[in-house]
Image (tube, rainbow, N blue to C red):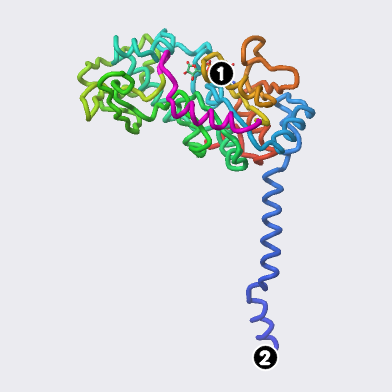
Amino acid sequence: MDPLQHAVEEASKSPPKKARDKKREALKAKQANRKFKGASAPDPSLGISLEDFTSFTETLKTSKRIFALLGAGLSAGSGLVTFRGSDRLWRGIEPQDLSDPQAFFDDPAKVWWFFSDRMKRAQEAKPNSAHVALVKLAEHKEGFFAVNQNIDGLCERAGFPPSQIAQIHGTLFKIKCSKHSAEKDKCDYVTEATYPVNESLTIPYDVDISDAAAPLPDVGVNDLPRCPKCDNLLRPAVVFFGEATPLSITERTYNFTSNGPIDIMLVIGTSAVVLPAAMYIPVARNAGAKVAFFNMEESDEGLATAWPGDWMFKGDAAATVADMLKGVVGNVGGRGGMN
Ligand code: APR
């Protein structure tokens, strides 16, 4: 063969397998390096000390059994209102007065509008960086289990493994028969749902029905969703005030908390005043856990108070959680996460 033609043919062949593998390895290392770049120090804008960052990261890295209690502050960075914040009122009414069995009995249409509004907002919101970082933590650590008080579906949409999370207050994205919890003639109908639950419960375009000045569309009881099994009214599959936590949730959580020492507990965006959820903080302490609080505000009373030796990471959870978990899960991107 002509030596020149031979040289051209050789050059056009793909590199030998060994060289290709080496290249691939180098690329992988580069990617991994990028993922953890800046992961050895906190973001200076968050005001977290290097000492706290390091001690937390080292503890989290070596932790096998990690517990978390999640609250409304986790989703505040996704634009959702909390339950006890200054923007909590819906048409001037306390949310807990609407999330109530008696309120549903007295005025099911109003309660349905309240939950339809919540559903619409949650459906339009996107999981933020904290949701994404928590999902990655669950993927990295099989001994991570979270009790989620939020009903907004953002943890599920971020991809939280269902076996590692307990939805202690239910979800907006399921509806059930209102006879579900009645002792007699109980109906077990439950189904998945999205906003709008039916045509009558569609919020008029560009109207903010959380504002009492906006007229609430007129909907009669006969227009509300009905159970296909027993024709009673359907209701959101959330735990109303005064109702018991589903037994299956309590059992799954007990199975985790009683299964050995807990290394660390993350308490994220919750005022920790609603029982039994808040009791999981002392339960974790009794199981040996050091506690890390992620909250906009430091609390000096009740179960949300940091003890000496705990960590208190003050600020928007969407930023602090992602930053504090990056030593274990890598960088998950900006505040918006999945935005
Ligand atoms: N980042 C972190 N924490 C925040 C943020 C934020 N961006 N915004 C608010 N917080 C904190 C508040 O300081 C407060 O401590 O989140 C907490 C929210 O508390 P609540 O409004 O009481 O919400 P939560 O603790 O989830 O409520 C528990 O009460 O009404 C019931 O069933 C409902 O699940 C809910 C339960």
Q: Residue at x 48, y 13 (%)?
A: 88
Q: Which residue is located at x 63 percent, y 76 percent?
A: 13
Kind of residue sitting beneath label 2? Asp
Amino acid type of the residue that numbered disc 1 sits on in the rendered structure = Ala
Image coords of residue 79 (percent x, y): 51, 24
Is 1 displayed left or right of 75 in the figure? right
Q: How crowded is mark 1: few (under 14 residues within 10 Å), some or many (20 or more)?
A: many
Up-down relation of residue 30 to residue 157 (above or below)? below
Instruction: Identify the residue under disc 1.
Output: 278
Separation of residues labelled 1 and 2 (CA atoms): 81 Å
Q: Which residue: 41% across, 8% down?
A: 93
Question: What residue is at 67 percent from the left and 24 percent from the top?
Answer: 291
Tell whether circle 1 marks a residue whose Cβ is less than 8 angstroms from ligand 1: yes
- Read off the magenta span: 240-261
Instruction: List the residue tagged with mark 2.
Output: 2
Considering every residue shown, the one lying at the far top of the view is 92
Q: Where is residue 48 in the image (x, y as percent from the top left)?
A: 73, 25
